[in-house]
Image (cartoon, rainbow, N blue to C red):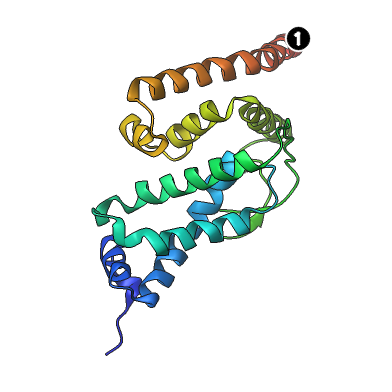
Amino acid sequence: MATSYSQKSDRDLVMACQRREPAAFEELVKRHQKTVYVLLYQLAPDWTDTSDLAQEVFIRVWRSITNLRNPNAFRSWLTQIVTNIFYDELRKRPRKLPTVSMDEPYTDEESGESTTRDIPDESLVPEEKALNKELSQIIRESMMKLPEQFRTAIVLREVEGLSYEEIAVITKTEMGTVKSRIARARTKLQEMLKPYLESQESTSEVSS
């Protein structure tokens, strides 16, 4: 009877991969590839070779998975590989101030459908939707202006929902430094967003 890998937990799939079962690895890739794409996009939305980098992530996963001692820690381990590949690639590239296009399509993490980067909300009136899209763009552009170490820390915390301890392990940094980077990243984002938010408050007061 053929093994149904789609019914197995991540832990069981990891253990099967450690036994070098290709079908288990295919299921693991299928299950986590969207997460890898989204994390790579959050770290570097202006890069056009995300597919190649995602492929490199899973090549490294297959080569290294026998070294993973705790199969239950696969998600954190995968995030660490993505982050390492991001930094490896970052060191190869010329430094420049990236720009973010909010009109280019990307693949939605949940549905797998191609969509744009604004946040849809059917309960909003057109004016509110426009403001929501504008704020989303400003936040993303502000994120890209952060130093790479700050951006990585806050993406892992706010987007991936990782604990300070997990981020410290992934970035190979002391936990105190992680907390400091996240706090400073939040402060910098607030400073960059302040002019926009104040302008919206002024507009609201005038219209009322």
Residue that protrudes farthest toward the front in the picture: 92
Judged left or right of residue 100, residue 75 is left
Q: Is residue 188 above or below residue 88?
A: above
x and y percentages locating residue 189 in the rendered image: 58, 20
x and y percentages locating residue 131 in the rendered image: 70, 29
Picture mark count: 1
x and y percentages locating residue 98 in the rendered image: 72, 34
For disc 1, the marked residue is 206
What type is the residue that disc 1 sits on?
A: Val
Residue 121 in view of the camera: no
Q: Residues within 10 Å of mark 1 (few under 14, many from 20)?
A: few
State the residue at coordinates (64%, 43%). Answer: 92
x and y percentages locating residue 137 in the rendered image: 69, 33
Q: Is residue 87 above or below residue 200?
A: below
Quadrant housing the C terminus: top right
State the residue at coordinates (33%, 69%). Answer: 17
Residue 176 in view of the camera: yes
Q: Nearer the viewer, residue 132 or 147?
A: 147
Quadrant housing the N terminus: bottom left
Q: Secondary structure at mark 1?
A: helix
Q: Nearer the viewer, residue 111 or 145?
A: 145
Corner quadrant of residue 63: bottom left
Q: Nearer the viewer, residue 11 or 60?
A: 60
Judged left or right of residue 33, residue 135 is right
State the residue at coordinates (57%, 16%). Answer: 188
